[in-house]
Image (cartoon, rainbow, N blue to C red):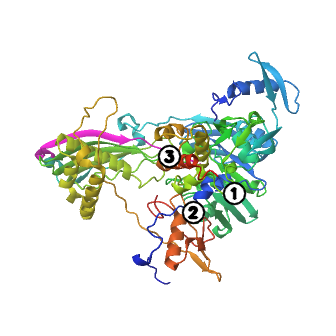
Amino acid sequence: MADYKWPDAEKRTLIGKRISRLDGPAKASGKAKYCYDYNRQGLLYGKILRSPHAHAKIKSIDTSAAEKMPGVKAVKVIQGPGTEIFWAGDEIVGIAAVDEPTAEDAMRAIKIEYEVLPHHVIDNDPKSTPQDLLKPSGDQTTGEPDKAFGDADVVVEGQYGQPVITHCCLESHGATSEWTDDKSLLVHVSTQNVSGIANQMAGVVKVPAANIHVQQDHIGGGFGSKFSIDRWGNESALLSKMADGKPVKIFLERSSELMVAGARPSSYAKVKIGAKKDGELTAWESESWGTGGIGGGGAPPIPYVFNIPNQKRKNTSIANHIGPSRAWRAPNHPQACLITMSALDDLAAALKMDPLEFYFKNMELTGPRANVYRDEFKIGAELIGWKQHWHQRGDQTEGPIKRGLGLSLHTWGGLGHASDCDLTINPDGSVELKMGTQDLGTGTRTTLAIVVADSLGIPMDAVKISIGDNKYPVSGGSGGTQRSAA
Amino acid sequence: MRDDEEDVEGSGLSRRDFLKVGGISLTVPLVIGHRVVKAAGADVKVFGPNKVPIELTINGKKMSASVEPRVTLLEAMRHELDLTGAKRVCDRATCGACTVIVDGKAVYSCTVLAIEAQGRAITTVEGLMTGDKLHPVQQAFVDNDAQQCGFCTPGFVVASKAFLDKNPHPTPEEVKRGLGGNLCRCGTYMGVRAAVQQAAGAQKGGRRNG
């Protein structure tokens, strides 16, 4: 394969210029079709009956009344009697019906008996949590934290944290599946991962991945929560099979979206942090905890960015009866950032130091990027007017609105991933690029067109970009700062 | 999953009251169209409970459908008429993604029953273009990159148009407040506000408004 490199700077006519997004007119005119908008021929509306209990065992399910209702085309028990349910909103029964009101009526006609079990949905204090839901790590120690705290001139303690938050994509999670013949499935799914979906479905719907055609023109938000087909996506295909292959659309109601389709783990920490009089950071101690659902939560990488020489850390993962966690913008990093940078700000205040000076004093602790951070902070401070606007804590101005300035550092690995494409140059000079990627609204379509046009030295309107189809060459998921960023 | 306390636009009847009235109709013989019964001391039209034929006037065209009385204007447009520009997001009159203009006023179509929207002039995002030409508000959204994923955009565009129709020369603060009924999860508010200011300028100068 030929090596590719960007056109030389002097030959670029498009890269680096302000160019309106190609999908702008379609979106502003309402013509852009999201997967939620496709009304396929003979469409059936799918609904999922969900557990109202956060922790329960299913005793019995009676779907007979629902099955007899006119307009109901398929009823499928997803999790049967005897199954233990670990979060409210978990999927119990799937239904497909000729219209939405009928599907809703059918859900109400299903009788489920549960044995309700004790549940725990509080994450802000490990002490009030039943022992069997706690998974503590051992103490992790670096250097000599006890000695360093003893030698420190200033030590501050604080508790910081943030609760579970939900992704809340405006286009809820969902898919419309239809069997175009006995062995071929067409799926319109709202996803950040067009090329990856078929392989996730193949084992469940029992056809080869090659027989599963995935399409998506536009997606109404993902935010890290839409890499998987999810159970409801598979169920749309299985219900379709039961209903003679007719398309079955299952898109989550807002309440379900909030319960099961995305939770970022919580993270809290009690932090003790010590420094010398001149601001040199010497010691860190933290006890952190949080939940990401029944599987517990990840440990935040604290202290964040600043590798303080003497540390003692302990993390406790709490299992909660809530929907499972999903990735969200550098998993565990925003939590670590908030905890660490809040503690640093408190320490700077105790030292009566300008936090910017305090950061510069300790910049070597950030490792090989220290010079980059120094340059970035200089530019940022100038643009913000840090010197003019920063003040010691306590805004003495009148009125209830107070203003202050703070700063923080954030990091993530972010690498490019391999993507293949087909590029066809037609005899009339027009060009088509095909790639199994997706445009989250971050401008993937537009970026690809710019790169192709600039590389070939042709105008953008001579380039057709075809994405959002797994029959195109494989591309990766849009996440982890891979693909175009907003 | 619906907010029963919302007023059904212009009817003076809350959705919960309406459903109660709907309950009364179960005890009387079914007829096509509506009947009038006394409820809470007032004459109330009663439809259904089964599907009833309706006629809506959307973007200047008469459109027919057959829906149950509980179906909202939003659902009727999306499911029966393939007008999918308006989105169902919160389904409880808080996010604005389903905004349409009814008799000159921006309303949340998720909280208007389809049967109640009959006889009114409804404008959706699909009705704003003139031929192939974007409406100045739509063009301003493109020019100011007032969108990312774009799912909230049709609601914002329609709300912006309705707002500018009433406030052709808004201050930035008025724009902020006037579009307070629409949510964008991607966070494009700065672009949206710039777009509304551009569209207002276009209207003032009459350059883009054609």
Asked where in the image residue A247 lies, by quadrant, the reply is: bottom right
Q: Are marks 1 and 2 in contact (CB under 8 Å)?
A: no
User: Would you name the residue on which mark 3 appears?
Assistant: B193
Same chain assignment for discs 1 and 2: yes
Q: Residue at x 31, y 34 (%)?
A: A402
Whole-percent x, y for residue A162 in the image: 38, 42
Question: Mark 1: which amino acid?
Answer: Ser
Q: CA distance from mark 2 to mark 3?
A: 21 Å
Question: Can I make out residue A71 in this image?
Answer: no
Magenta segment, which residues?
A149-172
Question: Can I make out residue A297 in this image?
Answer: yes
Same chain assignment for discs 3 and 1: no
Chain holding disc 2? A
Q: Are marks 2 and 3 in contact (CB under 8 Å)?
A: no
Q: Residue at x 24, y 37 (%)?
A: A393
Whole-percent x, y for residue B3 in the image: 62, 32
Choose the circle earlier in sequence order: 1 or 2. Answer: 2
Q: CA distance from mark 3 to mark 1?
A: 38 Å
User: Would you name the residue on which mark 2 appears?
Assistant: A22
Label 2 residue SS = loop
Q: Residue at x 15, y 51 (%)?
A: A280
Question: Mark 2: which amino acid?
Answer: Leu
* Of the pair A400 and A234, the residue shown nearer to us: A400
Chain holding disc 3? B
Question: Mark 3: which amino acid?
Answer: Arg
Name the side, left or right, on which A448 lies relative to A288: right
Is B45 rendered above or below residue A340? above
User: Would you name the residue on which mark 1 appears?
Assistant: A177
Label 1 residue SS = strand
Label 3 neighbourhood size at 10 Å, few (<14), some (14-19), many (20+)?
many
Asked where in the image residue B65 lies, by quadrant, the reply is: top right
Whole-percent x, y for residue A41 in the image: 77, 56
